[in-house]
Structure formats: C-alpha cells, structure tokens
Amino acid sequence: MEKFEQDRLDKLEKLRAMGIDPYGKRYNGQKSLVSIIENYHNEEGKRVRAAGRISNLRPHGKTSFLDIKDWTGKVQLYIKQDKVGESKFEAFRLLDLGDIIGVEGTLFKTRTGEITIQVEDFTILSKALLPPPEKWHGLRDVELRHRQRYLDLISNPETMKTSLDRVKIIRGVRRFLDERGYVEVETPMMQPIPGGAVARPFITHHNTLDLDLYLRIAPELYLKRLLVGGMERVYEINRNFRNEGISTRHNPEFTMLEAYQAYADYNDMMELTEGMISSLTMELHGSYQIPYGEKTVDMTPPWRRKTFVELLKEYGGVDFYDLSSLVKKAEGLELGTHGGGKTTPDRDKIANGLFEELVEPQLLAPTFVLDYPASLCPLTKLCEGRPELAQRFELYIASMELANSYTELNAPLEQRDRFMEQAGTEMTAGKVDEDFLLAMKYGMPPAGGLGIGIDRLIMILTNCTSIREVILFPLLRPGTRVTEMDTTS
C-alpha cells in the first residue's frame, strides 16, 4: 500500500477514535456555492450552510484558509481554532484534499475582497482515501479522463460545464417540441426485427421466449405506428445501438431525437430544425457566432438550402446525371464504382461517395442538403416529376451530418416494394417488419419525419470536437486496467 493512502487510513482511524463518523449522515439546508456568491449582498454577516469537496488547503498554525467546490462553483472558508474549539480544530487537521465536508458559518469579505465563510461548525461527510488527480491541477491524460470520468468531473471544471450544458440542451429540445404540441413517447429498445435505418445491430436473446432480439438501431417504424394510431405529433429522445465503428464522431451507443408530424413534409421539418437549433444556440451562447475547434460557425438563420445535385456540381465539379464523369472522378479519388454486389456502376452510391469525400468537408456553416438519390432513401416519398430523387434533407454543420429528415412514404404497397428492392430479391417475409406494413395498410397520414443526433448537436454547441467529450461514459477500447496510482500521474 502506498504511503499517501496509508496516511489517509491513519487519519481515518484517528477520526473514529475521536468518536467522529468519517462518512457522515445527510446534510440538509446547504445552499449551492454559486448562490452564496451571487447573493452575498443580501447575506453578508448572516449564517449560511454549505457543502463541498476540499480543493485547496492553506494552513497557518491555529487558523486555515481552504476552498470547497460543488457542481456550481467554489467558495473560500476561514477556520480558527478559537472559533470552532480545540477538539473540533484537531479533527480539522485530519482533513485532506478531496474530503467532503459540510460547514456552517458567517459570510464576510477578506481584505482582498474575496467572499468567505468564517466557519463556526463543520461536519465530515466523506473521507477520501486517495488524493485528487495531480493535486487538483487537473486530470489531463485523455485516456484516463474518459475511463475515470468521476476524476475528470472532480478536477476539470470544463468537463462539468459540458455535462451540465448537455442537460440544458436536452431540456431545451423537449421544451421546444412540447410548446409546439408534440408529445414525448417511448418505444421498444429490444426489437424482433431491426428497422428504420441501415446499420448492423447488436443481438441479444430472451430466455423465457427463446427469442433472439435486437437492440434498436432506430425507433422510426414504431413511431410511425403511432401516426397510424392517430398520435399526430410525437417524439422520442432515445438510445440507439449500432454495432459499428468507434471514432471521434461515432459511439456504438448514442442518443437520437426522432420526431414525426402528421400532415407535414420535409419542409415543415426544416423549419422546425432551424428554429430549434438556432434558439438553443442563442440560449446557450447569447450569440449566433459560436466557436468550433479553431473555426467560428455562423448559426444566424435563415440557413443555406441547396440540393444534393447542386452541391455535387459546386464542390465536386461533376454532374449527377453524367455517369461517366462520376465514374471517372471516383476512380481518380480511388473510390469504389460498384455497389451492392452489382457488376455495373451504381450511380447513386458513386455520387454519395463523391459527396462525402468532396462536399461534406466544405459545409462549415449550417446547410440543408435537399433531395437525395432515391435508392438511398427507402422510406421516403419521391420528388414530384423527378423519381430519381427523394424528398429528404440532411443538415450539415461544421462539416458534420447533424440531422436527417424525410417526407415519409405512406403508401403500403410501394413501401413493401422498396423494402424488397433495398434488401435484394432473396429477402423472405420473415425478414420484413410485416406488422409495420400491416399498420400502413390501415392508413398512415402524410407526414414529415426528423432525426437529430443529440450527441453531435451537443458537440457543436459546446465546442467539443470528440463525441467522447459529450458522453459521460463512452465505449472505449480495452486497455490496461486503471489502478489507484493512475490517479496521481
């Protein structure tokens, strides 16, 4: 056992020998530290209660200054032996950085103007047996920060702020939709048939029913069932699971907003998306100009709206309708020119590959990309007079896809044909969500549907360029087991 831990264990036993429980009881009536600071002008000279973790200790004989932190901020404490009594001060000497205490005392300002609580009594609430990282100068090792998020939150105020901003953003999304007549619902996370997206699912098994189930890749088909049932504006902020890669933009478990509105189309969802995100931006930043990495993103509405075909021509220099030029461009970039087992070039897949390579990196400012190749959109109505394109938009901000929306296909026979075409002629009925197709036969109203990647939205609004920074416990590759010694490295 390392000396620093043994020292703390010795202090623990001394506290117990003094009749003090080092893991104290509930502590009521405390105010948040930020409220104590903000309301000082009303509270000066009055008795207050506060609680927090010791982040700094500056002993001076029979007096001491120290700082405590809670999740709102920090405040300075001043403790004197003749104020709290000799036995209580002896217990105070057994405290360390990282210990959690509750205090009662009087508010005053020091000669330097710092708001301070003069401690008249304190309670030990939790004795820490390990010191905080790097003696409270912050945990900087990225791997450790993600593996030991509790230490990251303790030592890095920016991590706490990002985590609390996430809460504000999700709360703002709910408020925005609730105010517009949407209702929040819940759909199954375990599904007998994965649907609503093209992705590799995680598989699990229900023992009692002897049934293989899939963690959902999207809630779409269940939310559309609710449209059939007459729920005209629904949304879900849900956890989705896709058994795919891990990167700075992808986590296998992620949070998605999906919303559906009867009697609407993708134009209505565009207005909804722009209004929601721009209002969240202003609420969080007080400005439409926000930093992202080394760049500044202008979120001022209205946002640019361009078609997939127009942007492919503008940034890629190729015509979507000229297959030979698409193939030539793709071959020059060493991109694939065949797809889905086909031996002939697949125009839509080639065009989409070129779009991802040449166009996406250019879309810094918010851009609605409209009317995608139809074969990429099996759940979407086709554009009138242009059956090769579908009424779909994707929203890009900071060169990252953030939202996806359709004018939803509501023709059941056509939907079955699309499913079969998407999966190939070998698809059997057992692989199709027959209940969803049955529901559509009872009549699904025309509707607009929207999906927004909540984690990516939070990345942009909190200036985090890695998705791991906005997920409290991201999935990580197996690594060396974290040990107690890591906390002080």
Image (tube, rainbow, N blue to C red):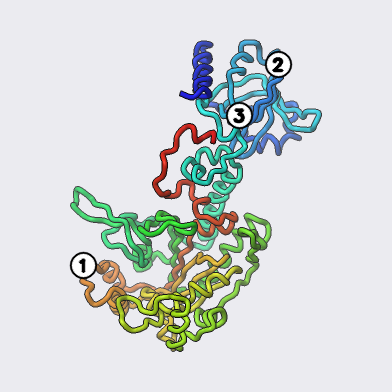
The reply to whether residue 24 is in sight is: no
Secondary-structure class at tag 1 = helix
- Rounded to the nearest angstrom, the CA distance separating label 1 from label 2 is 78 Å
Q: Nearer the viewer, residue 222 or 313?
A: 313
In the rendered structure, which amino acid carries the disc numbered 2?
Answer: Gly
Left or right: 149 with respect to 292? left
Give the residue at x 73% y 34%: 40
**Picture quadrant where residue 202 is located:** bottom left
Position of residue 469 measured from the top left corner of the image (x, y, whole percent): 52, 50
Residue 15 got which mark? none
Vertical relation: 206 (above or below) 153: below
Question: Which residue: 47% across, 76% down?
Answer: 333
Q: Nearest to the eye among marks 2 and 3: give it.
A: 2
* Sequence order check, earlier mark of 2 and 3: 3
Residue closest to the eye, 481 or 22: 481
Mark toward the viewer: 1 or 2: 2
Q: Which residue is mark 3?
A: 54
- How crowded pointer 2 is (Cα within 10 Å; few <14, some 14-19, many 20+) is rated as few
Q: CA distance from mark 3 to mark 1?
A: 60 Å
